[in-house]
Amino acid sequence: MAFAMKGRIGRPMIEGPCTRADDSVRRRIYWRRFFRDLVGGPLVVIAAMAMLLSLYAASGPSPYFFAELLAVGAWVIAIGWWGIGVITMLALRARRRRVRVGWGLVAAPVLLIATVLLVAADLPLRTAFLIARPAMEQIAQAQLKSPDGTELTTDVNVYGTCRFSHDGDAVTIEVEGAGFMDLWGFVYCPVGSPHTAGRATSIGGPWYRWYLRF
């Protein structure tokens, strides 16, 4: 009896249909998790960072150059990652692996389209200007009472360092970091169109969007 049991225990295990089925299930679970990790959180995080950088870059009177470079780089990585996800999904389906469309493959294009629409509508610029306007208007009105040619450099919440220059009936506000080689900012002129160096475009009331090219 003991000899018979020993023989049964020492007998090599034969792979049956149940074992092969378990291996198949494990492989499916592995590939699904691999695909989910590839095009899930990481892709959406990169796309979200690219969106925030794009909105920040577009909040100035002209895009902030270095923020714009970072945004472009982040979008290139996100789009490349998205392409790898699509190719991986198609390859897995070609091998008859049942994988669903990753939520990151849907979320990333949505974030890209939303960014394009918001920037095209100048919403980042309008929002930032609406926040900074009270502080800029208070400083500009004080500058109008100072002698012509007086300059003041100070921080203005969302725009950071700004240079206020009294020029006749207007105050030119240069936003540091906006643009690349040119000067960009705003002009406050409560008596009509400003007569300052550069070009000013009305954005409502006594406010103008201003730039000076070199």
Image (spheres, rainbow, N blue to C red):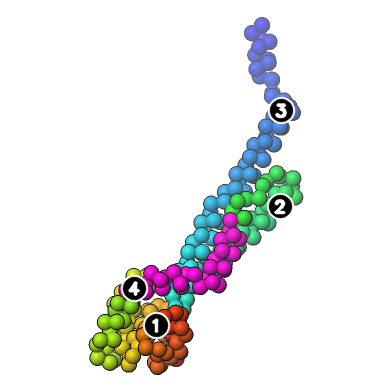
The crowding category of the residue bearing disc 4, from other C-alpha atoms within 10 Å (few below 14, some 14 to 19, many at least 20), is few
> Dot 4 lies on which element?
helix
Residue located at (29% from left, 79% from top): 139
Read off the residue under disc 2: 91
The crowding category of the residue bearing disc 1, from other C-alpha atoms within 10 Å (few below 14, some 14 to 19, many at least 20), is some
- For the question of whether residue 53 can be seen, the reply is yes
Residue located at (29% from left, 86% from top): 144
- How far, Cα to Cα, is label 4 from label 2? 56 Å
* Amino acid on which disc 3 is placed: Cys
> Dot 1 lies on which element?
loop
Q: In the figure, is residue 207 to the left or right of 30?
A: left
- How far, Cα to Cα, is label 3 from label 4? 73 Å
Q: Is residue 15 magenta?
A: no
> Dot 2 lies on which element?
helix
Front: mark 4 or 2 = 4
Residue 77 drawn above or below residue 40: below
User: What span is colored magenta in the figure?
Assistant: 107-136
- How far, Cα to Cα, is label 1 from label 2? 59 Å
Q: Is residue 124 magenta?
A: yes
- How far, Cα to Cα, is label 3 from label 2? 27 Å
Residue 2 drawn above or below residue 92: above
Read off the residue under disc 3: 18
* Amino acid on which disc 4 is placed: Pro
User: Earlier along the polypeptide chain: callout 3 or callout 1?
Assistant: 3
User: Earlier along the polypeptide chain: callout 3 or callout 2?
Assistant: 3
Residue located at (57% from left, 68% from top): 117
User: Earlier along the polypeptide chain: callout 1 or callout 4?
Assistant: 4
On the image, the x and y values in percent for residue 127 come to 44, 69
Front: mark 3 or 4 = 4
The crowding category of the residue bearing disc 3, from other C-alpha atoms within 10 Å (few below 14, some 14 to 19, many at least 20), is few
**Toward the viewer: 69 or 172?**
172
* Amino acid on which disc 2 is placed: Ala
